[in-house]
Amino acid sequence: MNSPVEKELLSTLTRLAETVQAMPTANPKPSLLPIFTRLDELTHQLPRDADPTLLHYLHKKSYEKARLFLQGRDAENHAGNCRHVN
């Protein structure tokens, strides 16, 4: 992970994971829409030559897989329905 966009993606993906984890006890429930909107914006800012695995995860909305990938933990990802795992 080198680019500023990738760093912001990781930060936003981490915030999403933390927000979802806190939802069962949160009152009122937070809106995830702003986080999803920001993730879409950041995805569109990635260069066309960005890592294809990262792009795949983001386009399929596999945000946990994208977070693990950006953390250098892609080996922890399991094959999804599309069977896309290295």
Image: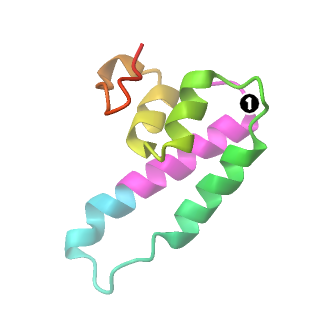
Residue furthest to the top in view is 86
Q: Examine the rendered structure and indicate whether residue 35 appears above or below residue 28.
A: above
Rendered image quadrant of residue 82? top left
**Is residue 11 one of those drawn in magenta?**
yes
Q: State the image coordinates of residue 10 (x, y, percent, origin top left).
A: 55, 41
Residue at 57% in and 70% down: 34
Residue 17 left/right relative to 38: left
Q: State the image coordinates of residue 77 (x, y, percent, origin top left).
A: 33, 26
Q: Examine the rendered structure and indicate whether residue 49 appears above or below residue 81.
A: above
Residue at 46% in and 69% down: 32
User: Where's the C terminus, which quadrant?
Assistant: top left
Q: Examine the rendered structure and indicate whether residue 30 appears above or below residue 12.
A: below
Prevalent SS, magenta region? helix
Residue 4 left/right relative to 35: right
Secondary structure state at the residue bearing disc 1: loop
**Crowd class of label 1 (few under 14; some 14 to 19; many from 20; radius 10 Å):** few
Q: Nearer the viewer, residue 78 or 1?
A: 78
Q: State the image coordinates of residue 62 (x, y, percent, origin top left).
A: 43, 42
User: Where's the N terminus, which quadrant?
Assistant: top right
Residue at 27% in and 77% down: 26
Q: State the image coordinates of residue 47 (x, y, percent, origin top left).
A: 79, 32
Q: Which residues are magenta?
A: 1-17
Q: Which residue is mark 1?
A: 3
Q: Nearer the viewer, residue 77 or 2?
A: 77
Residue at 38% in and 52% down: 17
Amino acid found under the numbered disc labelled 1: Ser
**Is residue 58 one of those drawn in magenta?**
no
